[in-house]
Amino acid sequence: MKKENNTSINNNKKKKEDLKKIIDFYENNITLITEFVAEDMEKYLENGLEADLIIAAMQEAVVRNKRSWKYVASILNNCIDNKIKTEQQFKIEQEEFKSNKKHPQKEQTKEKIEYKEVEMTEEEYKKKLFEKGKEDV
């Protein structure tokens, strides 16, 4: 029982340290923290995302000049969807994304359409338009 309590205390201490580290980064690089954002950050930690991953997501937002919690949360939600829980997994995913962007898969060739130039007088053109208008009705 005592061992469980020590583990629980250590986990709570680490969680508080991680949350402080995340909040400090947020306040130093994005903006002052609100209670809502702090609670949201805590939820991401509780969902198994590492503090370093959350900070990496904030760094990505800063680099892209998208300094908002909403943008960071979208990155984190994408991580959850893709089962990314660590900073290392996140960086690997980013590298793969950048690599695919530089070397896209074989592009589909667009169908080449050739048009013939047609010569007609203005009267012939107006007549064709008039006939086309009747067909549409």
Image (tube, rainbow, N blue to C red):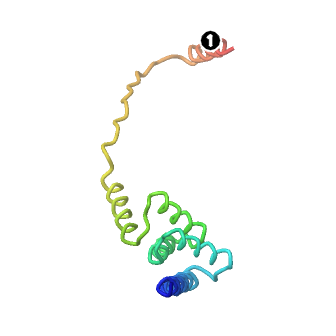
Horizontal and vertical percent for residue 63?
Answer: 47, 73
Asked if 111 appears above or below 103 in the picture, the reply is: above
Horizontal and vertical percent for residue 104?
Answer: 33, 50
At numbered mark 1, what does the secondary structure look like: helix, strand or loop?
A: helix
Residue type at mark 1: give it: Glu
Horizontal and vertical percent for residue 7?
Answer: 48, 84
Nearer to the camera, 9 or 105 = 9
Q: How many marks?
A: 1
Asked if 79 appears above or below 57 in the picture, the reply is: above
Q: Residue at x 47, y 63 (%)?
A: 79
Residue 52, can we see it?
Answer: yes
Nearer to the camera, 102 or 38 = 38
How dense is the environment of label 1, judged by Cα within 10 Å: few (below 14), some, or many (20 and up)?
A: few
Q: Residue at x 51, y 66 (%)?
A: 76
Residue 18, can we see it?
Answer: no
Apparent side of residue 32 relative to residue 22 in the rendered image (left or right): right
Asked if 66 appears above or below 100 in the picture, the reply is: below
Q: Residue at x 30, y 43 (%)?
A: 106
Which residue was labeled with disc 1?
131
The image quadrant that residue 42 belongs to is: bottom right
Q: Residue at x 43, y 64 (%)?
A: 84
Work out which quarter of the rendered image holds the C terminus and state it: top right
